[in-house]
Amino acid sequence: MTIPCASDAVHHSPISALPFVLLETIALISDTWDRKQLRLVNRLWQEVTTPLLFEVITLSKYNYRYPRIYVEHRVVPLASSLTFLQHMEQQSNPATAITCHAKSIRVERYDMDVKEVIRLLQICPRVESVTMESMVFMRELPPKGGLSFHPFVYDRLLAKIEPLFRGPASIRKLKLKGYIADLMGPIMLDVLPRLSDLHTLELDCLHWSNSSNDIWPPIVAAIHQHCPSLVALTCYYSRDDYFDEMDRWHTQQRNGDSPKVAIAPWTSIKDLSILLTDGTRDAFKIGQFVTYVAVKFPSLTSLTLTVACDATGSRPWVDLPQGSFQKLTSLKLVCNQGFADCLTVFDRLAPSALKHLTSLELEVDEEEVDVAHILSLFPSLQHLGLDSDGRMTCDTSDAKPPSHTLTSLAIGKHLYHGSHESSTLETIVRMCPSIQHFFLTLDCWALTNHVGGIVDGVLVDKLQQRIDKVLPALSNGQLKPMVVALPHANSLASLGIACRYNFIDSPGLIILASLPSKKTDSAGIQSTVLKSWYIERPDVDRPPIARPWGIHSPPALDALANWDMDLEGLTPAHNVDRLDFIGVIFLPSLPNRVYFEMEGVPMQ
């Protein structure tokens, strides 16, 4: 009789008997923590989860499982990264080594040597994407060399770096982060000829600015020459990178010559992200730069423009060539000031192009941003991402404003210090009845006793009374519910809720409730809890989790998540020592998908 071995038996377990594609789906929807546990079950699960776990290898200096405010507890010793590197090098069978699954490498620590990064690339032959801190190169400088430009320093650094860019031929994406412009500028010019096969180049390490074009030629021209097939480019733009070309372009336009002679078009670039470092208070100069971008990159479908200036002024405008930005579908504007003027630039130069945009993201530092005005400029918009340190409004003169086709709205993805009223969100959703995807950051919610609309102040008072009754010791009138009402969100399919700084290490409660059936009276809250979650960080070594209410949630708080419970005779929860926030969202129905983020990381 043949006795099956253990490796055979595991394949007959109920879950292992499922089709392989279904097991892959289970692994895909699991977070990293669960994938690590699944990988330990048996060889089949190891085969399923290993490619997902090691598709991206990150060598980080900080442990992102800890809150950012506890930086001193998050430093990962360099020895741990070097030990991991040595372990991967010692794997005897290249076919089964975890490095054969790596497609992306991220070196987020700047205390490593370049030679160690090269070792990492050598043992990961299938890597397609490399992200690294440019500060790594500083370790190759003389102890007292600083960042001063000297031939000896430059030659030594270049000799160390060149092998890095002779890495795996499979690399298609390169991203350099950090800031050491004085040395990285000329070095990048020397290594660009070795990067001709790149599809994506992100240079977040260069602030290109120098008075001598003989020594410091414009970086964009050099990238175009040596990497003509780039599809995506991220870099800084200084005045020297475009001013002379624009001057020749104006001259040729006046003479009736072809503008292509002055500005050679770069047709392969589809995705462009640029920071204009030419500080100016003149909107005309921004218009000049936008004109240059339109002529230089005629095939753009996505543009991110960061303007580090206050755009004002009224000099004459230049009309864009016909057909400019006609392929542009996604636009992102980052402005510290002058946001309205930047929108005016695009509206003045390319009004027909704006009407084709389907995605718009705004990161602005404005006291007030009017969403109704933005929607009026972009009639075809499908997605709007709004990050503002100021107040968001939605001013409409009509009692029934015209409907908009917006289907996706994200508020507070990157900037989350704004203060937004629930009534503003209600107005936006009323204007955009087709919204299917909605993302909101808890930090942006304004604490108010007046919500307005279908959720009146009496209902909020009833919620406050329930909180004070259940948690008299913690509340004392200080723990106020953050309330948002979306009565017109009838098409909502997914809802994202994020915690950034104010609640990153706080236990809290999120409640989705039905719309009130009528105005609240003394009888109680005329609404039903659809679903609720208890959010906490179980220990410092685990990421935060969002548990459906009833799964390891404090029973003493049941009255907060079950509004049908009578408060008469209720025993206060004196044994609960902490609950820092309660968020309540009133909706017509429960969305198909609800997800949470903490510091930008999805929670369970």
Image: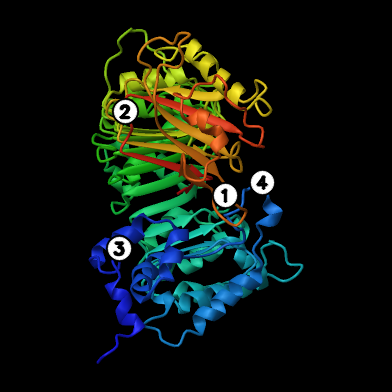
Identify the residue position indicated by label 2 in the image. 589
Give the Cα distance between marks 3 and 1. Answer: 49 Å
Measured as percent of width and height from the top left, residue 205 is found at 55, 55
The correct choice, above or below, for 153 with respect to 303 in the image is below
Task: Say whether disc 3 or disc 2 marks the residue closer to the N-terminus.
Answer: 3
Task: Say whether disc 3 or disc 4 marks the residue closer to the N-terminus.
Answer: 3
Task: Say whether disc 2 or disc 1 marks the residue closer to the N-terminus.
Answer: 1
As drawn, the residue found furthest toward the front would be 569
In the picture provided, is 556 more to the left or to the right than 246? right
Measured as percent of width and height from the top left, residue 560 is found at 52, 28
As drawn, the residue found furthest toward the bottom would be 1
Identify the residue position indicated by label 1 in the image. 209
Give the Cα distance between marks 3 and 2. Answer: 31 Å
Rendered residue at 41%/69% (across/down): 39
Q: Secondary structure at mark 2?
A: loop
In the picture provided, is 362 more to the left or to the right than 302? right
Q: Amino acid at mark 2?
A: Ser
Identify the residue position indicated by label 3 in the image. 24
Task: Say whether disc 1 or disc 4 marks the residue closer to the N-terminus.
Answer: 4
Task: Say whether disc 2 or disc 4 marks the residue closer to the N-terminus.
Answer: 4
Give the Cα distance between marks 2 and 1. Answer: 55 Å
Identify the residue position indicated by label 4 in the image. 69
Give the Cα distance between marks 2 and 4. Answer: 37 Å
Look at discs 2 and 4 and give the one toward the viewer: 2
Q: Nearer the viewer, residue 206 or 226?
A: 206
Measured as percent of width and height from the top left, residue 159 is found at 57, 76
